[in-house]
């Protein structure tokens, strides 16, 4: 008899630690769309050995994974992250058994709808999900004839979500006093200036850490106006997917 759904939920809530399959191409949980249920799944493993075995199987398809260890005290952080990414189910692996559990079956999704809009944290789950699917596939080292996934279709979905989304730009200082406002930037190896842009509050927090930075919401269509004059490109979510779009590409997407 295989593992039951109730047992899988218990392990996902109370086990001392487990391992999550992460994509090396996005530095985010590796997401799979189930062919039957169309659920957007993340795979979670009872042991490190199991996630390594899973990684070896996918390596044959040139999908590079790594196992990220989660301790029980940060399980809520993971589940909050999965909601923010648009993931709706978890596949639990233990011994040779698997069990899919929908996230809503054991975690309550945060509800910010009653908060004032100005104070509501920014999340873009549809955008995040489309970016991960596109970049997981784009960054696989495959020849054109080896691809079985329609990259163009994934790209069009991502571009549509970019156009519809708001983003956070990091600033240091008082937004009401532009003269005393500093905007952090990053540099490439050849000294090109990149302006970091964030799809949600989680991505902003990864970058800000202990720095006293504020996030200003900017619609995608207004990004060119909000960019530093010296910035040639924006890097979207630099601490994870690191999607770099030039000023010209952004203007072309806006249309």
Image: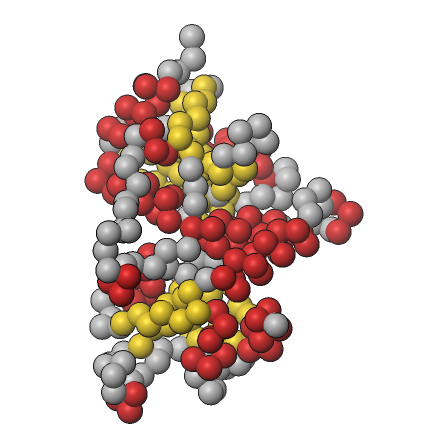
Residue farthest top in this picture: 1
Give whichever of 164, 51 is nearer the camera. 164
Q: Is residue 47 left or right of residue 131?
A: left
Residue 158 at x, y percent in the picture: 56, 56
**Rendered view: 95 above or below 226:** above
Point 49% across, 42% down: residue: 31
Percent position (x, y) of residue 79?
32, 41
Outermost residue to the right: 145
Vertical comparison of 237 with 85: above or below: below
Q: State the residue at coordinates (41%, 61%).
A: 199
Q: How is the image coloured?
A: secondary structure
Position in image of residue 167 (x %, y %): 41, 66
Q: Quadrant of the N terminus?
A: top left
Placement of the C terminus among the 4 image quadrants: bottom right
Drawn side of residue 101 relative to residue 65, left or right: left
Asked whether the viewer can see residue 213, the reply is yes
Number of marks drawn: 0
Quarter location, residue 186: bottom left
The image quarter in which residue 203 lies: bottom left
């Amino acid at each position: 008899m295989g593992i039951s759904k109730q047992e899988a939920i218990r392990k996902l809530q109370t086990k001392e630690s487990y391992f999550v399959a992460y994509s090396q191409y996005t530095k985010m949980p590796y997401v799979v769309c189930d062919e039957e249920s169309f659920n957007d799944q993340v795979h979670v493993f009872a042991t490190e050995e199991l996630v390594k075995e899973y990684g070896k199987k996918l390596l044959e398809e040139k999908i590079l994974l790594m196992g990220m260890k989660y301790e029980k005290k940060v399980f809520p952080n993971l589940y909050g992250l999965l909601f923010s990414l648009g993931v709706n189910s978890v596949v639990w692996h233990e011994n040779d058994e698997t069990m899919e559990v929908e996230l809503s079956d054991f975690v309550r999704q945060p509800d910010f709808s009653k908060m004032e809009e100005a104070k509501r944290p920014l999340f873009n789950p549809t955008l995040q999900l489309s970016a991960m699917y596109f970049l997981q596939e784009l960054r696989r080292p495959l020849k054109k004839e080896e691809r079985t996934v329609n990259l163009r279709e994934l790209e069009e979905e991502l571009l549509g979500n970019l156009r519809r989304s708001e983003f956070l730009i990091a600033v240091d200082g008082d937004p009401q006093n532009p003269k005393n406002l500093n905007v952090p930037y990053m540099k490439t190896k050849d000294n090109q200036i990149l302006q970091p842009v964030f799809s949600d509050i989680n991505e902003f927090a990864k970058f800000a850490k202990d720095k006293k930075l504020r996030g200003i919401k900017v619609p995608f269509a207004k990004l060119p106006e909000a960019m530093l004059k010296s910035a040639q490109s924006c890097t979207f979510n630099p601490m994870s997917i690191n999607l770099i779009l030039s000023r010209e590409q952004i203007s072309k997407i806006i249309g």
